[in-house]
Image (tube, rainbow, N blue to C red):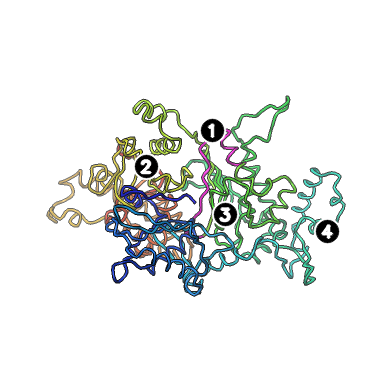
Amino acid sequence: MNFFEIKSLEDISILRESSEVECKLANGKDGKGALPNDMWESYSAFANTDGGTIILGLKEKKGRFSISGIENIEQVRTDLFNVGNNRNKVSLNIISNNDVKEVNIDGKKLLVIYVRRATRQERPIYLNGNPIGYTYVRANESDQRLQLEQVKRMLAEQVEDSRDSEILPFYGMEDIDFESLRIYRQTYANLNPAHPWNEYDNQRFLKMIGGWRVNRETGEEGMTVAGLLMFGTHPVIQEKFPYYLLDYQERPEAKTEKRWVDRLTLDGTWSGNLYDFSRKVYRKLIEDLKVPFELKEGLRQEDTPVHIALREALANTIIHADYTGRASILVVKRPDMFGFRNPGLMRVPIEVALQGGEPDCRNRLLAQMFRYVKFGEQAGSGLPNILDGWKSQHWKVPLLHEATNPYDQTLLELRMIDLYPQKIVRELTSVFGDKFTNLTELERTIAITIYSDFYLTHHQLCTQISAHTREVTLALVKLERIKVICSTGEHKGKVYHRPDVEVPTPDNALGQFLAENLQVTKPKSLSEKHPELSPELSPELSPELSSVLLANESKWKELEKIAAPVKGNTRKLGREKVEEAIIKLCEGKLISLNDLANLLEMKPDTLRKNYLNPLVASERLSLAYPTKRHHPKQAYWSGVVENKKD
């Protein structure tokens, strides 16, 4: 774990940028210091997420920290280990002496506790002897309780090294799609023409590759989960995994909300198993792939690094998926990127997975089956191969990240965007000279990323750059200090941008322009909207005002048509349909929370918490005023706002 070194008050002022830091006063009743009880919720949350730092002896007021100090620091340190080793309070202590440091600033002592990410075998880390209701994860800057279903999944991950080796009673060869198996066997025979397995019957062949297994301790014999997923038929697979869903979408534009032009999903026209999905989708992914061919010893190399990267990405998505999860497997092809999503979180930290060499595959038999037909490399090497493939084209570094809302999922984005756009590099070099060229690679990357966009939050920068949050924080502080970038807002509402960019707020000129020109509102009567006018005055007396009101009313009627299929039926239709409607309603225009609630016939709080907040977090929706998240005039938009002020 990368420790956040604290040496001065300036270091403490930086802490408010990081969601992986929790500060506690730890004064105790006598003011001399005591271990705070609520510290253990943060301990559980950090251990179950990505690790973090807990600092005792700091006072927080309005997002800023000051030093209070701990007088009896040795007693607090002793209590930390005593409580941490008490199984009635904490399920497991993962803190060692090297993880606890005393820091002295201006004569006052702080206790800094580094909590690493717990391993899969150690999670969940829970409190009070009960994982149900007392298991926490870190979300932004808060500790949140895990739901029952998530706790059960974490417990299953803890004890099951491979999730696909289970023998399925009452499933047999009649549940296999024999055409899928035939194609697999033909591919295997082409790669291994002299192998003795080619002579075996189907059941014995399945046994050799892991699709059929015998438990030698109990004598139980049957198809494995891997065999069913790989070669079964969709209806039978869904009997075992009710949430099983495979989806490939090709979208014509670089916009999340645009509909697909080609789609492969479980519609009954094909087997619906993983092997057929991998074959069909891979062909679609590499079709029209604009990668120059290479010559090696006079022969054209069809299998370029990009082909290998896409094959690895697809294989990783399939073999690391948690098929008991509610999220679907989703593969998206767009002109600017390839996207891959699988249900389930990472089993190892992202930074470890990106380096390779420490595999912890969720479905080892599936990985083995794919490897037999050269679809996917040896365990642990997949992600480095993907990085190498993208690096060979000088494209933006692939982004691997996790999401827990609405369901646990892992996402990989392979963007075909030049890492360093030459136009931006030339501009930064021209304006700042040596000040820019002398920056570290991370600092240059952050500056270029910010200059390539309108504005970005700390979280967005961390995910786009795939760097550790603390490293990004320190780089941003330096870039702002030397005036390469600027920031607007405070704490959670803070965004970073070019010095010449104005970020919209409800009170500045750009914000007022957006509200007046791009926001669509529920029409009001003339007297409601302009009480200064007499009710007797006809709109004809103010043709300009009349025109504005009529235009808004026309736009509102268009929105009502979009919302009609969803209005009042949000519970029946399901999350995906509601989200699609919200995104379409907000496309290219601003709409307030209350107006969206009116259109969809939903309670504003329910709409905001269950739909709008997750859509904003996943960047499918944007805020009109990013620095004032909870402002009463806040509005939402999606896609490109055509009339954005220059």
Q: CA distance from mark 2 to mark 1?
A: 24 Å
Specify whether 454 is left or right of 216. left
Q: Amino acid at mark 4?
A: Arg
Please rate how many residues cluster around mark 4, counting C-alpha atoms within 10 Å: few if below 14, some from 14 to 19, many from 20.
some
User: On residue 348, which mark appears?
Assistant: 3
Return the residue at label 4.
Answer: 204
Camera-near label (2 vs 4) is 2
Q: Amino acid at mark 1?
A: His
Task: Tell me residue 599's x, y (percent).
Answer: 36, 59
Please rate how many residues cluster around mark 1, counting C-alpha atoms within 10 Å: few if below 14, some from 14 to 19, many from 20.
some
Name above or below for residue 592 compared with residue 479.
Answer: below
Q: CA distance from mark 1 to mark 3?
A: 27 Å
Element marked by disc 1 = loop
The earlier-in-sequence mark between 1 and 3 is: 3
Return the residue at label 2.
Answer: 476
User: On residue 99, which mark appears?
Assistant: none
